[in-house]
């Protein structure tokens, strides 16, 4: 049985979708969720779904080996970033080479980099009058949103779409594709 650990920072809708997707799987399960936000809604979702969840601070994550030691105990086959906003430390990436993936709410390399997440991305897409956008699932490396692309899915942006409309379209793509791509990545 493959083991998945999720890192999240916010509401946790992608994390919940992944947990439910793998709940009855014979191949994999989400064994833990880690968050840098002690008030994140993802913690409430995990409690309801009976999934182990822990929060940590920046020191535990990047200045010590506390989070790395949690991962060593959990022994994940894959680490999945689902709305996790901090840059991943190189020493954790080195401990899990090609085992950390992220979902980004745009078609990378467009609208990637520091500060480009959530509504910041959707606002930029609308302001720049893009005619399409989408999601990118990619490996994580030492730079924001620059790891090798695993999968992309596109959607149309209408001239009448607001940033909220774009966010809704992106959310639908995430819910549809993210679990399947995680499963496929686990089986490679």
Image (cartoon, grey):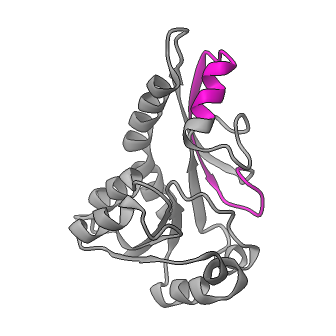
Residue visible at 44% across and 48% down in the picture: 178
Left or right of 184, for residue 65: right
Measuring from the top left, give residue 111's x and y in whole percent. 70, 36
The residue drawn where x is 63% and y is 78% is 61
Q: Position of residue 119 (x, y in %)?
A: 55, 37
Q: Which of 54 and 103 is in front in this view?
A: 54
Residue placed at 73% from the left, 79% from the top?
91
- The residue stretch that appears in magenta: 121-145
Q: Can residue 188 be seen in this view?
A: no
Q: Where is residue 28 in the image (x, y as percent from the top left)?
A: 36, 69
Relative to the observer, which residue lies in front, 43 or 99? 43
Q: Residue furthest top?
A: 159
What residue appears at the point 47 percent right and 34 percent down from the top-left corner?
A: 170
Describe residue 40's horizontal placement relative to residue 90 as left or right.
Answer: left
Task: Tell me if 163 is positioned left or right of 173 in this view.
Answer: right
Is residue 132 inside the magenta stretch?
yes
Is 184 placed above or below 109 here? below
In the rendered image, residue 64, in percent from the top left (x then y), is placed at 68, 88
Q: In this view, does 16 lie above or below 64?
A: above
User: Against 159, is 22 above or below?
Assistant: below
Residue 106 lies in quadrant: top right
């Amino acid at each position: 049985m493959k083991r998945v650990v999720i890192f999240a920072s916010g509401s946790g809708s992608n994390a919940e979708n992944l947990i439910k997707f793998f709940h009855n799987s014979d191949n994999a399960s989400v064994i833990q969720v880690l968050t840098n936000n002690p008030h994140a809604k993802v913690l409430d979702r995990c409690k309801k779904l009976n999934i182990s969840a822990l929060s940590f601070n920046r020191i535990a994550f990047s200045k010590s080996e506390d989070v790395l030691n949690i991962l060593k105990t959990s022994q994940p086959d894959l680490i999945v970033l689902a709305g996790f906003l901090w840059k991943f430390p190189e020493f954790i990436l080195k401990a899990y080479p090609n085992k950390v993936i992220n979902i980004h709410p745009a078609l990378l390399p467009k609208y990637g980099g520091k500060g480009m997440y959530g509504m910041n991305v959707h606002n930029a897409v609308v302001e720049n009058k893009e005619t399409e956008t989408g999601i990118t699932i990619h490996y994580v490396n030492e730079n924001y949103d620059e790891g090798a692309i695993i999968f992309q899915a596109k959607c149309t942006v209408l001239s009448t779409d607001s940033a909220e409309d774009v966010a809704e379209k992106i959310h639908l793509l995430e819910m549809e594709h993210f679990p399947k791509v995680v499963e496929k990545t686990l089986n490679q």
